[in-house]
Structures are given as structure tokens and as C-alpha cells.
């Protein structure tokens, strides 16, 4: 079937055709799900060759084809654009207007998943000729009441973790199903904001929170909590920060370190370690402490050769503060340099 009806707070998947209407009230009405036949009036042809003469079309066919590597861009207005990353980058190959703002885009197993502000995930695939098909796609509704899907991350090129409200949904991109869901935070009004995966672990941050949570990527066990607020306050002092709390606004794993950006411009870098044998200490004058909590039991954990669980200890953390008090919005890792 193309779609499955469901109750509120339950995931729903249905197929859309063309550009869906902006109304958020669209929902499946039959076991087959609605197929929305709305023409795409973006002015870009299916193969991205509108406005190109026949001679030019055949001359630049290889360069302009979305069979080759592409770059996907999403806008706040809900427009999704596909450009070539080979040549003629300014020319848009495909475009489609989605129902709400685009907040995250990931590629996994030959599919592109696009998270929207209305609580749905648009899933795109290639057509039979190898081109990306933006006319026919599936929408996965994560349940009502609708909230923004702020983050997604790919786990081992097999699954996608999706942060939705205070929960994490694990999506199978092949059959477009929710394999498992669990609470990342006990408060329902909380929001999962950042996800960072490496090895057997996923670090999770919560909106307006200074604590990072580590979950096992496959058993989904809660492994560790790390609160950076005592460390930052101890190193810089609350007076210098200008306010009394620290919130995490950006997370990245690179060069075997966990990079944490905060709302007041501070960057914290913590080395990752395979060992979870860390003692919980109380605060001691002159150094921060009591901020790392390890939840798992090393005697019962199943460890396979080559596995790596990215624990961290604030005792080895480094801090960068250059006087910038605006929030750190994102990190970008490039070869050998952060």
C-alpha cells in the first residue's frame, strides 16, 4: 500500500505527487492513502533541462544530469532545490515546493530524507532512469500535535535517528517505517535539538539544556550524561558570561573529539574515550567535578571487536572563548582542520 491510516501521536506514511498544498490538515483517508495530483509549477523540467536548446542539452547532458553527484538545498519557505555538484552549479536541476520550512536533509541508502517544520519527513528516491524524482515522494507524519523536526542523523548508513519533541524516532529508510521510538528527555515539552553519531554511540542535546546525553546506537541504552555548565562557569565565571545558565546550541564529532558550541559563544572540546570506567567525584576547590554520570554496567555490555562507544570526561576538556557572546550556530569539519 502507498499509505497507512493511523491515530494521533502515531507515525503515518502516504505518497504525494507534485507540490503538496500548504495546508497542514492533509491526512490519509483510505488504506491506500491519498495521492495528491498537484502539478509542479516551479518551471524546472523533470530532467532539469528547461530553457536549454537541444544542442546544448545533449552537449551538457552528463554535466547536467542528477544521476551524477548533486547538492540539495532547502529554504525556510519550503522550497527544495537540487543542483549539480559536478559543473554549472548555478543551474537548478530539480525543484519542488514542500508544505513547510526545511530544517534538515540527510542521504541514506539511495534515499534523501527531508525534515519539515510541520512534523513530517519527505522521502525522495531516484526514478528508473537514475534521475532524482522530486515529483513523486512519500511523506512520513511523526504524529500529532505537530512540532518541528529539528535534527536527523544517519547511523552506519542503515538507519536515521530523528529528533521529534522530546523523543527520538528510528526510521528505516528502505520501508519508510518507524522501527523504534524512545524518550530522550522525561519532560514532554522538551525538544531534541542536535544529534551526533560515531561508533556505537549517539550524543543528544536538548533545547535550553546544558547536559549532553549519550545513547547506544543499536541497543538505545542510556549510557552517560555530561553537564558542561559547571565546567564553563568554573573556567570563566558566571559574571563574564553575562547570565546564569549555559545552553548547548551546536554539536559535532570530529578528530575523535566532541565539539560543543554554546549560546554565549563558548566552544568546548572534549576527547572521546572507549573507557567508561570513570569515577564520579564531588566538586573540589580549584577544579570542576561531579558533572559526569555513567549509567551502563560494563559487566553486562556486549562488546564486539572493533566497536567503539564514545564516552567522554570533562576532566580532559578544553575551552575556547574569544569574547563573542552570540550563539555558536554550527560547526563544519574539513580535512585535517576544524
Image (tube, rainbow, N blue to C red):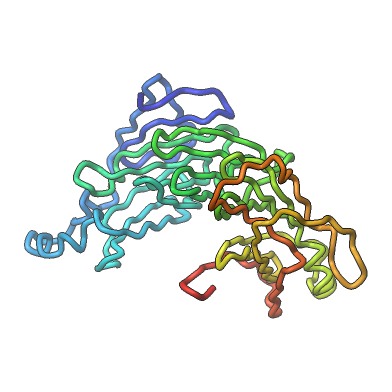
Q: In the rendered view, tell whether residue 258 sits above or below residue 7.
A: below
Residue at the top extreme?
31
> Which corner quadrant holds the N terminus?
top left
- 181 on left or right of 128: right
Q: In the rendered view, tell whether residue 232 sits above or below residue 295.
A: below
Residue found 51% across the figure and 68% down from its top: 332
Give x and y (percent) for residue 184. Answer: 67, 42
- 261 on left or right of 254: right
Residue at the right extreme?
285
Q: Quadrant of residue 185?
A: top right
Q: In the rendered view, tell whether residue 175 sits above or below residue 60.
A: above
Q: In the rendered view, tell whether residue 165 sits above or below residue 264.
A: above
Residue found 72% across the figure and 50% down from its top: 224
Residue found 28% across the figure and 48% down from its top: 132
201 or 62: which is nearer to us? 201
Give x and y (percent) for residue 149. Answer: 55, 45
Residue found 24% across the figure and 49% down from its top: 131
115 or 154: which is nearer to us? 154
Q: Quadrant of residue 173?
A: top left
**Residue 2 visible within the image:** yes
Amino acid at each position: 500500500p502507498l499509505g497507512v491510516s493511523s491515530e494521533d501521536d502515531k507515525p503515518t506514511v502516504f505518497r504525494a505527487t507534485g507540490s503538496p498544498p500548504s495546508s497542514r490538515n492533509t491526512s490519509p483517508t483510505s488504506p491506500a492513502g491519498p495521492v495528491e495530483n498537484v502539478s509542479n509549477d516551479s518551471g524546472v523540467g523533470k530532467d532539469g533541462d528547461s530553457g536549454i536548446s537541444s544542442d546544448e542539452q545533449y552537449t551538457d547532458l552528463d554535466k547536467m544530469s542528477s544521476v551524477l553527484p548533486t547538492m540539495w538545498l532547502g529554504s525556510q519557505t519550503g522550497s527544495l532545490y537540487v543542483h549539480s555538484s559536478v559543473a554549472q552549479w548555478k543551474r537548478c536541476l530539480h525543484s519542488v515546493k514542500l508544505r513547510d520550512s526545511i530544517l534538515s536533509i540527510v542521504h541514506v541508502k539511495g534515499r534523501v530524507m527531508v525534515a519539515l517544520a510541520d512534523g513530517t519527513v519527505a522521502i525522495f528516491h531516484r526514478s528508473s532512469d537514475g534521475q532524482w524524482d522530486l515529483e513523486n515522494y512519500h511523506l512520513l507524519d511523526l504524529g500529532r500535535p505537530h512540532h518541528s523536526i529539528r535534527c536527523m542523523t544517519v547511523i552506519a548508513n542503515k538507519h536515521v535517528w530523528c529528533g521529534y519533541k522530546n523523543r527520538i524516532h528510528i526510521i528505516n529508510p528502505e520501508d519508510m517505517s518507524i522501527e523504534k521510538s524512545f524518550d530522550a528527555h522525561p519532560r514532554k515539552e522538551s525538544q531534541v535539538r542536535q544529534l551526533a553519531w560515531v561508533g556505537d554511540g549517539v550524543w543528544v542535546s536538548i533545547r535550553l539544556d546544558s547536559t549532553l546525553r549519550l545513547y547506544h546506537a543499536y541497543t538505545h541504552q542510556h549510557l552517560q550524561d555530561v553537564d558542561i555548565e559547571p565546567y564553563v562557569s568554573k573556567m570563566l565565571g558566571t559574571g563574564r558570561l553575562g547570565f546564569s545558565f549555559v545552553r548547548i546550541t551546536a554539536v559535532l564529532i570530529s578528530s575523535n573529539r566532541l565539539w560543543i558550541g554554546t549560546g554565549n559563544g563558548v566552544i568546548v572540546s572534549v576527547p572521546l574515550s572507549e573507557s567508561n570506567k570513570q569515577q564520579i567525584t564531588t566538586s573540589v576547590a580549584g577544579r570542576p567535578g561531579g558533572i559526569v554520570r555513567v549509567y551502563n554496567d560494563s559487566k553486562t555490555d556486549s562488546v564486539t571487536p572493533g566497536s567503539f562507544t564514545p564516552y567522554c570526561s570533562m576532566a580532559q576538556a578544553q575551552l575556547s572563548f574569544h569574547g563573542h557572546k552570540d550563539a555558536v550556530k554550527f560547526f563544519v569539519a574539513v580535512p585535517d582542520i576544524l
